[in-house]
Amino acid sequence: MKTAKPLIALLLLSGIIRIDGFSQEVKTNDGLTHIERIKKSKTSIPLNPDDPILEAWAQKRDFSKDPKREPGPINVQRQAGGMAYVGIPTFFKQPIALTPEDLVAGNVDVAIMGAALDMSAGRRGTAFGPNAVRTAEGYVPWGDLAHIYSESVLVNPLKSLSIVDYGDAPVDFLSTEKTIVAVYDQVKEIAETGTAPFIVGGDHSLMYPNVAALAAVHGKGKIGVIHFDAHIDAEPGGAGHYLTHGSPVRLLIEEGHVNGKNFVQIGMRGWVVSEDMVDWMRKHEVRYHFMTEIVARGWEEVMKQTLAEALDGTDKIFISFDLDAFDPAFAPGTGTPEPGGLTPREIFPILRALAIQTDIVGMDLVEVNPLVDSGYQTTALLGQRVMREVLAGMVLRKNGITDPNYRHPKLMDHVGKEK
Ligand SMILES: [Mn+2]
């Protein structure tokens, strides 16, 4: 019996057995073979409109058949607490929410969702990112066993904020173009309730639906983006596709979702940057900080400037965090690693500072690829820390802290000379 399910799946995929929607004939009423159809249609990929499962991947199941419940976050853990590796995996072992009504009823600050989309990158595997991040905490206990206070600042975001796991966006695992519409809808659904969506990918094509959805809610040109990345991600597309994981920045700026001057980029490096690309960014007044500049001027200087730029013209900020901003020594599990990157010690303080001094309307964490992680969980572990640092900054802001460089005084001096 153990092998029955995989066997049935194999038989279905191979066409040996057919059930429900699988029993219909492939339509050929245009008189073409599929090769001819594809060759004729240079700018679209022909899909079978009569396929009964054409949209099934995106359909919501019928919630009305569930046991009746009041709206609000649902704790799916049976125990009051446990070790990280025990229990049903949700982001930070937080309760889940399934609907916007749950977010409103729970007065939820942050809804973390997965977007397992990895078709726009040459090296697949980031689709496994969301669940890798959900299970990345090696030893941090949860619930009643948890005594978790953020590094340097000693606040506990999981107790001070209402945070839920909003599940995953639906994914057409054969199409970036179709999937991003579903991601856009789900991000917008969260943001419309006043909750900040945190999207865990998935590849960086996600920045486009994520930011476009937030711009639709907060206003076009009203939010700024702080973009951590080894790459500019402002290519004009690839192989005719408007959107790849290398092109979301160009689409967002050229379509007017974000003004170039409210787009701050940090950490770019490597051999794929051309002068043309840099000129495009200068034309659109993007504020970029290559590693070239960071190494020459020093991280502290550039960080200070970045924080000032983030506040110029908007105080609503979206953080788009590509794990390859880190040096691959720290984050090997990513598809496009570039040596010479930033360190966790450099990045954690700027994340807290951004969240202290701006209104974080959302963030994404992308390009975590556990399939190529030579350190097993190293990259996903770093990814969940990136979110934790932002959450810690959000708590400090809520507590009235205004100093972006705030550190807990007792951690700075062991003899009690703190003010
Ligand atoms: Mn990127």
Image (cartoon, grey):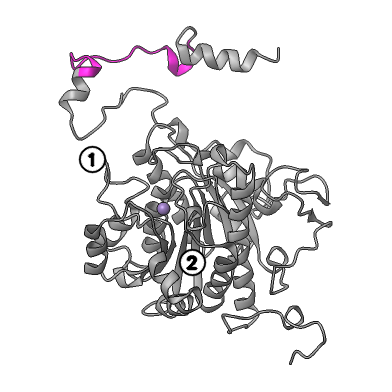
Is 120 inside the magenta-drawn segment?
A: no
Determine the secondary structure under disc 2. strand
Using the rendered image of the protein, determine whether residue 255 is visible from the camera's viewpoint: no
Looking at this rendering, what residue extends furthest in the front direction?
296
Where residue 5 appears, x then y in whole percent? 62, 17
Q: CA distance from mark 2 to mark 1?
A: 32 Å
> To which residue does mark 1 refer?
240
Tell me the residue at 68%/66% (across/down). Answer: 157
Q: Quadrant of the C terminus?
A: bottom right
| 228 relative to 182, above or below | below
Q: Of residues 77 and 251, which is closer to you in this image?
A: 251
Q: Quadrant of the N terminus?
A: top right
How many marks do you count on the picture? Answer: 2
Q: Of residues 353 and 223, which is closer to you in this image?
A: 353
Determine the secondary structure under disc 1. loop
Q: Could you say which disc has been placed on residue 170 in the image? A: none
Using the rendered image of the protein, determine whether residue 73 is visible from the camera's viewpoint: yes
| 343 relative to 35, above or below | below
Q: Earlier in the sequence, mark 2 or mark 1?
A: 1
Tell me the residue at 72%/50% (across/down). Answer: 75
- Where are the magenta residues, as a range? 18-35
Left or right side of 319 for 1:
right
| 173 relative to 197, above or below | above
> To which residue does mark 2 refer?
361
